[in-house]
Amino acid sequence: ESVLMACLGLLEEEWARLEDDGPPEISVVLEHLLVKRPGAAAPVEQPSGRGVVTRKDRPRRSDNRSDVQVKADLLAVHQAPKFKDILRARQKLPASAAEARFLDLLAKNQCVIVVGETGCGKTTQLPQFILDSLILAGQGSTASIIVTQPRRLSAIGVATRVSSERLDDGSVGYVIRGESKQTERTKLLFCTTGVVLRRLAGGDSLKNVTHVIVDEVHERTVDGDMLLLQLKEIMSKNKKLKVILMSATINHEIFIKYFNNAPLLTIPGFAHPVEDIYLESVLPKLRYRPTNLKGLKKMTEEEKQQLRSEYSAGGLDDESIRAIQTISRSDRIDYELLAAVVRHIVSIADKPAGILIFLPGVQEIRQCLELLRTIPNSKVFPLHANLSSDEQRSVFAPTSQWKIIAATNVAETSITIDDVVYVVDCGKVKETQYDPENGLTRLVEQWVTRAAAKQRRGRAGRTRPGICYKLFTKKQEAQMSPYPIPEIKRVPLESVSLTVKVMKHDVKAFLSRALDPPNMAAMDHALTTLEELGAVSDTGEVTALGQHLASLPLDLRLGKMLILGTMFQCLSPVLTVAACVSSKPLFLNPMDKREEASRARERFADGNSDLLTDVNAYDECLRRRSDGASQGAIRAFCEENFISATTVRDITSLRADLFSALSSINLVPPGSKATAPFLNANSTNSNLIKACILGGLWPRVARVSLPRSAVKFDKVQAGAVQRENIAKDYKFFDVKGSNGRVFLHPASVLFGATAWKSPFVTYFQKQMTSKVFLRDATEVPMYALLLFGGPVSVNHIAGGLTVGTKDAFVKLRAWPRIGVLVNQLRRLLDLELT
Ligand code: CDP
Ligand code: MG
């Protein structure tokens, strides 16, 4: 409360300005709090113009050994018998044969591009070649090589592997969000791309770095593209910095061009030949035919002939032709067909091996494995990013049975399973698309690109010649687009734009120099969003809030929510909210047990809010743990209540990461705990927590248009059909923007809620599937909307208000005095808010 009062004191200075405008926006409040808060980091003196430095990102002290000593230490490692065994294995990798050529190119050029098939040794070997050559040339003490990885797991995994190849001599470290393992001896640092970007945004110009290796550039993530853009600028000023790009053999010409004809090093792979079998060739061999051949008109002999030649399989009978047509025209995955192909493989092979099936998502993997469990002498494995690392690891264990792995595209380039001989590719992938016009994200299933199809088939030839079965025709493959659309053209850009602004660049000019510049509309939308969030002022200056947000490693809205949670002393629940929203769903929702699962969730329902419900369930898990419940008891509790134990773990670790990020920007004192009383004085005030949630998510607010007869609700029982009916009576309208009708997601605890206290809900995401659905919704009190939301006109919201409330609202909007604000905020803290 004292923080709040300090803030209100500051606001009083702005008396005159506020006189006509009603309550100030929460970002104005934050502006005062964040800049002038006592104990904050030294303000805005760095050349970068940023108010804070992440402690973790400060340049490390350099190695205090001499060059000679470093070299002697390395040579000592090389003498160890264990090292010699490792070296022998390393020398078998294709990358080894390219060492001399690589170092020669690097000596003569500032930038080198390396391509090679997955598994040839790019990531683990090339950084070591550079390091060893520097040390042996007597430049060991100053050597500093950064290798970026697109994912946290791979950063740790690869760092561990490389470190062990060097007998853990201390030369290798890693930094990912919230976790850092490095010493003054570290010379080879594996980082996620995001970590390096934040370091650059903090004003570090990589002066002490000798090499930056950007791995997996072909993935074309926003972070990856941004890093290339910034490295390009840095390289032109710092000629000593060497940059190496590493890529699978996908579309590498564009990188060569982008880096002014940088030389290309191709490492030949040791891939065995892989035979392609397309739908038209495999189908005639199967017993399977799709049941639904309706809708296909009778073909003339000429048309059949045409198709036969198109399928280049002369002997196709009529039925096969129709079956191929049916399957290839359907936009569903044909699981029966898939299972038939797997059975076919098992029936013709001479001995068991690995079968890797590529599917678009977790749901499809589940469905497919259900059908495949009946295959004799086999083990089935799911493989996707949602699994814990233990679960992921089980797939690598050798077995004498058939190993059937159903995977998402994680198995395309980043995970390699050596015993795979057969690949079954359904040809589909799920991708998020973002529409900047209406801020809508959608998860769209679509054909993979030809580049991805090529990667997938390549996984069959790791240890011996393999076969790739494709559930699409050769002609369909020819029509796939050659490469994926870079992420920068598909996602919201507000976070990227803020970073660019903090670095004092003009957003549009800077981003148009990217490998694939984003569209103008997306950039315009990002700038508007930054203003709405209060990260940028209406004159385009980065605000104090904006500076803080730029150094927090998460979605800007969630970052703002955390800052509010800190200010208003309800940090613990708000941390959980931010962590939940950034993790996989806490509650499981198995297809066959939907009703049961949603009833389980309702047991934790709290405050007409999906987010507070999650907080409730998470807290309950923790409470049991601290009460001394056994692992088994907690697991049983989770299972019983459809709570994902993996997600509980993820949330715990993410909460810790986020808390340490807050501490690194000095928003919370070093050494304090997230549960500290001074950060949680209001943690049981659910209205205030909701206000903080809203403050972060604004303007993602929808107005609920309540049905006329409220009586109706009391009579309705919980049940799938009735729930659907209730939902139809509500209308949700976006408060700002298109004003179009939106729908509560059926998984929401608000779905079918009867006791509404306020006609407003805030939500984290709007997603388009069959309709526009709101996800992670929270009912918010009107006062919260007034005080923590941005400017909102009565017209925007009037439809949802009764005459009485409408009058009150209008009055509130017009209240000119700061005293009113003080009172409102007090009431907010006093739990009087409805
Ligand atoms: O980067 P690239 O895909 O070219 O290959 P890499 O990651 O350097 O891996 C080279 C080889 O090391 C692979 O073929 C794997 O067999 C092996 N490796 C491993 O066994 N365990 C790891 N954590 C990483 C690599
Ligand atoms: Mg690699």
Image (cartoon, grey):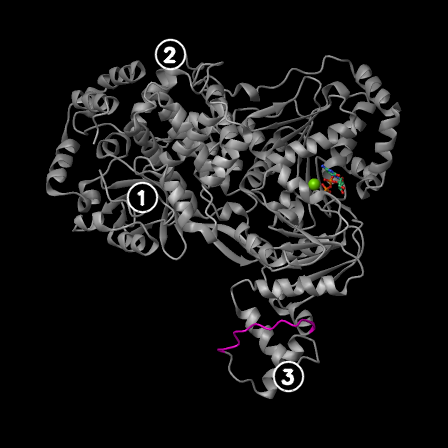
User: What span is colored magenta in the figure?
Assistant: 285-295
Q: Residue 305 carries which label?
A: 3
Location of residue 708 with respect to 75 vertically, above or below: below
Q: Residues within 10 Å of mark 3 (few under 14, many from 20)?
A: some
- Residue 48 seen: no
- Residue at 77% over, 50% down: 400
Q: How crowded is mark 2: few (under 14 residues within 10 Å), some or many (20 or more)?
A: few
Place of residue 137 in the rendered image (x, y in percent of width and height, measured from the top left): 82, 24
Which of the 4 image quadrants contains residue 10? top left
For the residues carrying marks 2 and 3, which lies nearer the camera in this image?
A: 3
Amino acid of disc 3: Gln
Q: Does the magenta stretch include residue 188?
A: no
Q: Which mark is residue 205?
A: none
**Residue located beneath label 1 in the image:** 750
For the residues carrying marks 3 and 1, which lies nearer the camera in this image?
A: 1
Place of residue 505 in the rendered image (x, y in percent of width and height, measured from the top left): 47, 32
Q: Is mark 2 on a helix, strand or loop?
A: loop
Q: What element carries label 3?
A: helix
Determine whether the beta carbon of the residue marked 2 sits less than 8 angstroms from the nearest atom of ligand 2.
no
Is mark 2 in CB contact (under 8 Å) with mark 3? Answer: no
Distance Cα–Cα, label 1 vs label 2: 41 Å
Location of residue 200 with respect to 387 vertically, above or below: above
Q: Is mark 1 on a helix, strand or loop?
A: loop
**Residue located beneath label 2 in the image:** 38
For the residues carrying marks 1 and 2, which lies nearer the camera in this image?
A: 1
Quadrant for the N terminus in the image? top left
Amino acid of disc 1: Leu
Place of residue 763 in the rendered image (x, y in percent of width and height, measured from the top left): 35, 41
The numbered mark, 1 or 2, whose residue comes first in the sequence reads 2
Place of residue 276 in the rendered image (x, y in percent of width and height, measured from the top left): 72, 63
